[in-house]
Amino acid sequence: MSPKQNERGFTLIEMLVALSVFSLAALALIRLQAYTTRNAAELELRVIAQSVVRNRAVEILTDPRPPTLGETRGEEQNGGLQWQWTQTAKLTEDQGFVQVDIAAREPISGAPASLTILRPSGLRLDEPSADGQAATQDGLSQQ
C-alpha cells in the first residue's frame, strides 16, 4: 500500500527531532528547579543570619550600658542552628557615639550577615558610672 498524496504525517526523523527538543527543554527545567531549590535554602540561611545580627543590634541599643570597646564574640541559637557572631565597637570621631560592627556566620554553610549601628557613647565626664566610679574620658569601659 502506498500512501495517498493527501495523507500527511510526521516522518521518523521529524519525530526524533521533536523528541530531542522536548528532552532538552525538560532537562533545562529540571536544572532550573535544582538551582531554585539550592538558592532557596541559601536565602533562608541568609535571612536567619540577618535576624541574628539584628537581634544583637537590639540588645546593644537597649542595654543601658554602652558596649565594651574592642572585639566581642559569642554564639546564639536561631532557626535550629548555632550561629557565631562578632561585634567590634569603636568610638566615632566626635566621641559622642560608638560605632558597632556586627557580623554573624553559621559555621557549617558560612552564611554571612553584617550590620553597622551607631549608639550614644553613654556616660558624660561629669557623671559617675553605675558602680560609683568616675567615668573614663570617653565614658566607656575598655576591654
Image (tube, rainbow, N blue to C red):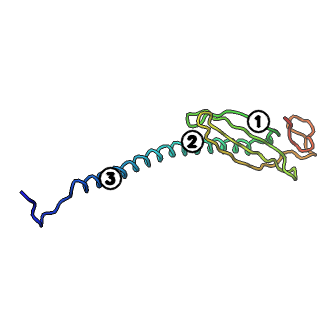
User: Residue 22's mark?
Assistant: 3
- Which of marks 3 and 1 precedes in the sequence? 3
The residues bearing labels 2 and 3 have C-alpha atoms spaced at a distance of: 35 Å
- Residue behind mark 2: 45
User: Residue 72's mark?
Assistant: 1
The residues bearing labels 2 and 1 have C-alpha atoms spaced at a distance of: 23 Å
- Which of marks 3 and 2 precedes in the sequence? 3
Q: Foreground: 33 or 119?
A: 33
Crowd class of label 2 (few under 14; some 14 to 19; many from 20; radius 10 Å):
many
Crowd class of label 1 (few under 14; some 14 to 19; many from 20; radius 10 Å):
some
Q: What amino acid is found at the position of numbered circle 1 in the picture?
A: Thr
Image coords of residue 103 (percent x, y): 69, 42
Q: What amino acid is found at the position of numbered circle 3 in the picture?
A: Phe
Left or right of 82? Residue 69 is right
Q: What amino acid is found at the position of numbered circle 2 in the picture?
A: Leu
Image coords of residue 58 (percent x, y): 69, 44
Q: Is residue 11 above or below residue 129?
A: below
Tag 2, which secondary structure? helix
Which-is-in-front pick, marks 2 and 3? 3
Residue name at image x 65 percent, y 38 percent: 105
Residue name at image x 64 percent, y 41 percent: 52
